[in-house]
């Protein structure tokens, strides 16, 4: 046996001491472990448990899919697609100039602008927002340092500027509506976000059998609009040609279905592309058909004549001796069309006689005229489902000036309306005297497919007989009067021209040069299916309703009748 | 000198007791225990396998869900593309490039009794036209 000294024996006390030392060391070690065990598993168990849970369990907001906007035929006008946003941590980029140079062709931006962002003293800068997947993939494959990627939903408008003023657009950051129907119907379109509670491993994978609960997101509702894309396109093209021909500053076209109040087309030019709004003047966002006011001028004569017919003060063949002019205080009213000295009420409309209409208006008086104007919807918003609608200007009859107000109002001055309001007046006549609330959304389809049709309010404004008589007078305007350019081959068309001097705020007088040229009409006159209103702002050539706006009307009306399959009624 | 002899105790079974020889039947049944242990082990392995399979399936499901998301995204991208292709402005441009034009003249064929105005409206219009023509 080794270890035995020459004496042949060890000292028993030393061996026992080592044993005791080892034992104590082990005891202390185990004691330490035990103490820590008690602390971890007992005293601080809840703290550690929460800490671990906080690392594993993640609460994620599940974004609701924003609803799609369709036209009346199911064509997509606004769609949400997945996109990839590229961002960078500039502090991780050692050579920003090289990274910017490599990124430039991939994202289509000048290297200088990218470099400016990459040189920022920040841990997060956007490099490119909402790229399409293919484009983002090319950036990913470049394996650039400090460049990261983030999935983001992106709103896309496949028809671009064609329906921009109606559909509007969303804010890119959060996809909330900013303009148009995107704003008006933001709540139903947006849906309700959900929540996912899930345990994930360090690689971000879901831990099976871990905590898992989900409150699914409620997808946004889809909107089916009343807009018919083909008519919208035809109206846009016709209006653009009209603006090019006349040199007008801007123009508006509204196409209505009088029986239902559905807006088939609503165009404002100049337009903009909602997919790329960089550098766009925000004034272009305005849907002038709903927000801008103009004095209706001669198109207002329909209201005056309809009111007089409805009140029994005149009939279509009541004749008036038309003077050379009517002077009221400092204001002189004249006719701008050549016509006989005596005109029937029908001829007053056909020749667009200011003087004849003033005579009819004087018969009506302020109160009766106001009553019918208000009945037709002037001076109050139509309630169309569009944000920022202007209500128009129509003073109470007791506030009308005793001198020129009745005369001026009867021929469309002292009152301001939107193109939609005025189109609605004509739609009322087209619909046998029944005013139907205009609307842009036909039905809302929720995330489960349930359809909620939009119900339009109605009210009878004038009798069907009066409306029928007025329609025939409007046909006379196109057949015999100032609206000859509005005729459509194969159809009986009725309408009214309007040429209004614009009020110059700077001089405080009506401008001799700036006018609003308009034409509003309907077809087929016997049973109108379509009403079209055309308004041109400040045309330089063909600066009248008959020569400037009526040809545009004819183009739009023909396209609308053909698109809707309305059979010709002979002309 | 002779020492007194000491008596040696003899082991004799006490009365009422008997010697029993151990038999094979009393031995521990080792085969049974092995069987039980094997079954338990197999069950344990089975449980581990099933747990692993479940985990594997869970990851597969997660991957499939991710693929579904990708396909859904692709679906909407294709719908967007289809909508862009249906843009009337694009179609018009292509049609013009192909030499298509709007007709110069439109011929309307009116079929008797289809879409024509009612007699009542005709009469009223004839009346009004008569009045208009009678004007000075």
Image: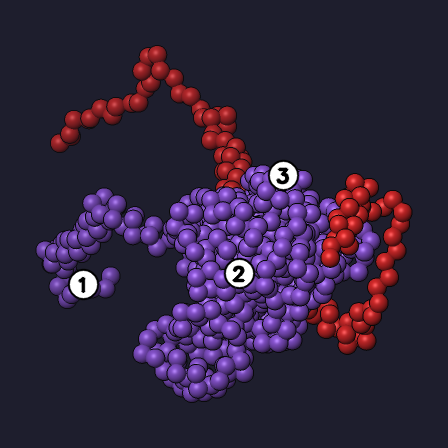
Q: Earlier in the sequence, mark 1 or mark 2?
A: 1
Tell me where residue A178 appears, x and y as whole percent.
45, 60
Secondary structure at badge 2 equals: strand
Q: How is the image coloured?
A: by chain
Question: Vertical placement of B75 versus A262: above or below?
Answer: below
Indicate the chain coloured red by its letter.
B
Instruction: Give the numbered dot on residue A4.
Output: 1
Instruction: Select label 2 or label 3 by which is in front.
Output: 2
The residue depicted at 63 percent of the width and 59 percent of the height is: A352
Could you give the CA–CA distance between mark 1 and mark 2, rounded to whole angstroms? 146 Å
| Most foreground residue, A366 or B70 | A366
Tell me where residue B44 appears, x and y as whole percent.
50, 42
Could you give the CA–CA distance between mark 1 and mark 3, rounded to whole angstroms? 133 Å
Tell me where residue A397 appears, x and y as whole percent.
43, 47
Label 1 lies in what chain? A
Label 3 lies in what chain? A
Instruction: Select label 1 or label 3 by which is in front.
Output: 3
Image check: A566 left or right of B26?
Answer: right
Image check: A507 left or right of B59?
Answer: left
Indicate the chain coloured purple by its letter.
A
Secondary structure at badge 3 equals: loop
Q: Earlier in the sequence, mark 2 or mark 3?
A: 2
Tell me where residue A359 appears, x and y as whole percent.
56, 53
Q: Do the CB atoms of the residues marked 2 and 3 lie less than 8 Å apart? A: no
The residue depicted at 75 percent of the width and 50 percent of the height is: B131
Image check: B4 left or right of A221?
Answer: left
| Most foreground residue, B28 or B40 | B40
The residue depicted at 44 percent of the width and 24 percent of the height is: B21
Question: Vertical placement of B25 versus B100: above or below?
Answer: above
């Amino acid at each position: 046996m080794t270890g035995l000294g020459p004496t042949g024996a060890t000292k028993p006390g030393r061996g026992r001491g080592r044993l005791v030392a080892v034992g104590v060391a082990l005891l202390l070690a185990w004691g330490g472990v035990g103490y820590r065990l008690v602390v971890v598993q007992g005293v601080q168990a809840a703290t550690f448990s929460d800490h671990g849970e906080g690392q594993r369990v993640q609460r994620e907001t599940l974004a609701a899919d924003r609803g799609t906007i369709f036209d009346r035929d199911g064509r997509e006008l606004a769609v949400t697609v997945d996109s990839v946003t590229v961002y960078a941590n500039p502090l991780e980029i050692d050579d920003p100039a090289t990274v910017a140079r490599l990124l430039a062709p991939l994202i289509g931006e000048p290297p200088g602008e990218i470099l400016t962002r990459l040189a920022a003293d920040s841990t997060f800068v956007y490099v490119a927002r909402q790229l399409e997947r293919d484009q983002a993939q090319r950036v990913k494959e470049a394996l650039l340092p400090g460049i990261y990627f983030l999935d983001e939903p992106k709103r896309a408008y496949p028809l671009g500027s064609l329906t921009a003023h109606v559909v509007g657009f969303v804010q890119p950051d959060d996809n909330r509506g900013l303009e148009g129907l995107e704003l008006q119907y933001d709540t139903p379109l947006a849906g309700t976000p959900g929540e996912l509670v899930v345990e994930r491993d360090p690689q971000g994978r879901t831990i099976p059998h871990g905590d898992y609960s989900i409150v699914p997101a409620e997808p946004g509702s889809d909107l089916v609009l009343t807009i018919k894309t083909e008519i919208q396109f035809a109206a846009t093209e016709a209006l653009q040609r009209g603006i090019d021909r006349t040199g007008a500053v801007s123009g508006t076209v509204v196409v209505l279905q009088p029986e239902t109040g559905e807006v088939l087309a609503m165009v404002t030019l100049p337009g903009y592309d909602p997919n790329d709004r960089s550098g766009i003047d925000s004034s272009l966002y305005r849907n002038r058909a709903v927000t801008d006011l103009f004095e209706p001028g001669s198109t207002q004569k329909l209201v005056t004549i309809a009111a007089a017919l409805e009140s029994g003060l005149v009939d279509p063949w009541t004749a008036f001796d038309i003077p050379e002019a009517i002077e009221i205080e400092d204001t002189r009213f004249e006719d701008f069309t050549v016509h006989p000295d005596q005109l029937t009420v029908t001829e007053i409309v056909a020749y667009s006689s200011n003087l004849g209409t003033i005579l009819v208006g004087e018969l009506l008086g302020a109160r009766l005229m106001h009553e019918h104007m208000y009945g037709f919807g002037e001076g109050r918003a139509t309630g169309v489902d569009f944000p920022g609608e202007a209500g128009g200007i129509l003073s109470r009859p007791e506030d009308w000036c005793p001198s020129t107000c009745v005369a001026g109002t009867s021929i469309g001055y002292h009152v301001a309306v939107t193109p939609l309001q005025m189109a609605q007046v004509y739609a009322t006549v087209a619909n046998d005297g029944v005013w139907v609330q205009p609307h842009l959304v036909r039905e809302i389809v929720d995330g489960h497919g349930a359809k909620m049709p939009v119900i339009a309010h109605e009210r009878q404004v004038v009798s069907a007989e009066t409306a029928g008589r007025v329609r025939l007078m409007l046909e006379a305007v196109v057949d015999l009067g100032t609206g000859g350019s509005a005729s459509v081959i194969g159809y009986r068309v009725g309408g009214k021209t309007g040429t209004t001097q614009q009020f110059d705020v700077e001089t405080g007088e009506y401008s001799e040069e700036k006018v609003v040229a308009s034409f509003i009409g309907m077809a087929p006159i016997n049973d109108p299916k379509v009403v079209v209103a055309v308004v041109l702002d400040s045309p330089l050539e063909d600066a009248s309703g008959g020569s400037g706006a009526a040809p545009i009307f004819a183009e739009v009306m023909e396209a609308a009748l053909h698109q809707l399959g309305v059979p010709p009624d002979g002309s | 000198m002779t020492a007194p002899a000491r008596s040696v105790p003899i082991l004799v079974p006490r009365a009422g007791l008997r010697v029993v020889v151990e038999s094979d039947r009393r031995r521990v049944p080792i085969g049974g225990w092995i069987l039980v242990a094997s079954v338990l082990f197999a069950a344990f392995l089975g449980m581990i396998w099933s747990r692993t399979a479940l985990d594997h399936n869970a990851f597969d499901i997660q991957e499939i869900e991710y693929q579904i998301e990708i396909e859904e995204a692709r679906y909407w991208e294709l719908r967007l593309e289809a909508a862009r292709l249906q843009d009337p402005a694009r179609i018009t441009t292509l049609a013009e490039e192909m030499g298509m034009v709007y007709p110069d003249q439109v011929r309307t064929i009116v079929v008797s009794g289809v879409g024509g105005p009612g007699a009542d409206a005709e009469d009223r219009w004839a009346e009004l036209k008569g009045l208009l023509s009678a004007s000075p």
